[in-house]
Amino acid sequence: MKEVETKMLERAKELLESGEVARVVGWKKGEFCYDPSPATFESVEELKDFTYDWFCGANLSKYLIQISKKEGKTAVFLKPCDTYSFNQLVKEHRIKRENIHVIAVECRGKFDIEKIKAKGISFVTGAQLDGTQVKVSTLYGEETLEKSDVVLTKCATCNKDYQVQDEAIILHERTKKDVDRFAEVAKLEAMTEEERFAFWREQLSKCIRCNACRNVCPACSCVKCVFDNPASEISAKVNSDKFEEQLFHIIRAFHVAGRCTDCGECSRVCPQHIPLHLLNRKFIKDIDNFYGEYQAGETAEGKTPLTSYTEGDTEPNDVFKGEAK
Amino acid sequence: MKKIAKAKLNELYAKISESMGLFLPIKRAGEVNYAVWGEGKEVSLETLKTVKSPKNAFFPDSENLMKFKTEGKNIEIIDVRKDYKEEKPFVLFGVKACDYKAIEVLDRVFLADPVDSYYQARREATTIVTLACSKPEESCFCKVFGIDATAPCGDVTTWLDENYLYWQANTEKGEALTALVADLLEEGGEESVATQQEATKAILEKLPFSALDLSRFKPENLNDLFNDPAWEEMSEACLGCGTCTFVCPTCQCFDIRDFKTSEGVLRYRCWDSCMYSDFTLMAHGNSRTTQMQRFRQRFMHKLVYYPSQNDGLYSCVGCGRCVNKCPQHLNIVKVIKTLGGKNDD
């Protein structure tokens, strides 16, 4: 990963020095090896804090809504999953494509420090991929973990490829994973209604309404969310009853249906680890089923199943019954 | 000092629950938060940091303040506080040193004149049993705020090791609770506790954030700190979510709203977050219009405004929850490092 970071840094320097771009959007180092933050770099000096490693899981695309409105061109490093969000936001006229220079950057899955810590490992000082395993160095020595146990949930089933790139920095090819991203959804579908209700009740009861899922979500790009608008009469800062607890997330999932690219940021940021991505995946699976396979963010143009009408469309009633036409 | 075998803890919980409510770290759907104990609940005292702090024992995420019923031109105001008074006393169990210190921070807000009677009622009905830390982790920095993680205060202080929970009453309330469970306790444990404390202190010394420099966070530097250009860069990745404020043991802001129900109007309050765009929204508009201003407010409150009004007491206790939970890894440690020791000139 170090070589990739070095290449990225070189390229960022070139672009800033030559004046081709006014700023570069990437990640900067944190306090530990595992807590980098998204950052904008406007000069070569600022790049001293630049980093790209196994913990750069954050999706940078949503930041471009604001940044692309700034004077001058912006270069951004996007991972495969981020390119879908980027395309979708371009499609929705939220990002000014002409102001952005996309550098597709290598990604072989990102690690989740919380999953590493949950294994009882603390004081982590570094992590490296070694085949299918991850070597984690700590103050107490080295630990070896299975990669599949420590990657972010969103990376575990990701087989995405770059959908947009003006250039690329890719030194290692990714191996396609033999996984079904809908397997967890299928498990929920196989439950009885009561079991499924109990599952979501238990999960959603943990929600603290911090709105991290909404605020990080590239599909949640409303200038003012209805839940933040006191004039909407439904604004809320708390789940005042069980009904709201359940409905907030379900309504949000409905709102992003057909536009959610399955970037998985919602589940990454949830402080209570609610598997929110499963709601979105259920919708994606249903859309595939009812309207034909569709992947939001694959292109920045074209019609979408939920916003275009064809005579042969599935009837709402069929959707309710869970049967495709 | 007294002790109880770990294997008998469930008996202890059951005994307390006979006459009092018991609020302690419980694992539910994979996450550990403070909740009411009951048979079959999975207690997790070992969890160093519950996701939410125990503050919601006194200051719940949301609570009803009063109800209004209108009939013609008459408005009936229904005080719901009497429901709280009838609540039985409860025990808050397993509170870590940082979270206990945070209760002092909250007390200074809610118990100062004018006293918040909702908070006060719960606070007075509570016996707090603290639990010393034995495995602090790298995001902990309570030491910076003068907190001793190995000897928290509270009505009762406890220590946990492989075999026993050690128990020491500190106050009258603590003595009363000890008497209630006396049959389950046996004498002894001083040595084990001392050994554990020594080992823990050695770890605390070595923690990466154990020597953060707070020297610049003084009332006289308020303007300099407020106007520091570093806020822009520190806040640029902030999502404006409320995670840091809702997991924080000292964040105390709330909003009051009316809710129309079929049986009249319900007035409730709920946690609010200075990170939210409508936090300072007033009739005239909003005094904070950018995320930088909101971000700055949160840390200035913790490190400058609150201490300047509370004898220098910081309203951060170094629990490190924001360090672990911020989706983009922004946190108070980064702010302290960037601004704290910076020379004024």
Image (cartoon, coloured by chain):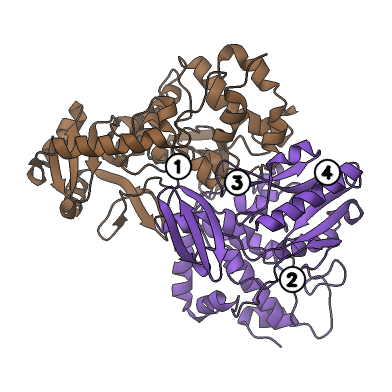
Chain colours: A purple, B brown
Which one is nearer the viewer's eye here, B266 or B156? Answer: B156
Residue, x 61% and y 25% (percent of image)? B339
Determine the residue positioned at 42% across, 19% down. Answer: B112
Residue type, mark 4 in image? Arg
In the image, which disc is placed on residue A161?
A: 2
Above or below residue B110? Residue B260 is below
Q: Residue furthest top?
A: B220
Which amino acid type corresponds to the residue marked 2 in the rendered image?
Asp
| Secondary structure state at the residue bearing disc 1 | loop
Asked if residue B156 is positioned above or below residue B7 in the image, the reply reads above
The answer to whether tags 1 and 4 share a subunit is: no
Horizontal side, residue B150 vs residue A242: left or right:
left
**Chain ID, mark 2:** A
Which amino acid type is shown beneath numbered disc 3? Ala
| Residue placed under numbered mark 4 in the picture | A23
Task: Estimate the x, y position of residue B17 in percent, counting from the top left.
Answer: 22, 48
Judge by depth and name the residue closer to the eye, A13 or A240: A13
Which residue is at the front of the view, B67 or B39?
A: B39
* Neighbourhood count class around disc 1 (C-alpha, 10 Å): few under 14, some 14–19, many 20 upward: many
Say whether disc 3 or disc 4 marks the residue closer to the N-terminus: 4
Q: Do labels 3 and 4 share a chain?
A: yes
Which mark sits nearer the N-terminus, 4 or 2? 4
Q: Could you give the CA–CA distance between mark 1 and mark 4, rounded to whole angstroms?
A: 33 Å
Q: Nearer the viewer, mark 3 or mark 2?
A: 2
Crowding at dot 4, Cα within 10 Å, few <14 / some 14-19 / many 20+, comes out as: many
Mark carried by residue B138? 1
Determine the CA span between mark 1 and mark 2.
36 Å
Q: Is mark 3 on a helix, strand or loop?
A: loop
Residue B4 location, x and y as percent?
A: 14, 46
Q: Mark 3 points at which residue?
A: A236
Q: What residue type is labelled 1?
A: Glu
Mark 4 — on which chain does it sit?
Answer: A
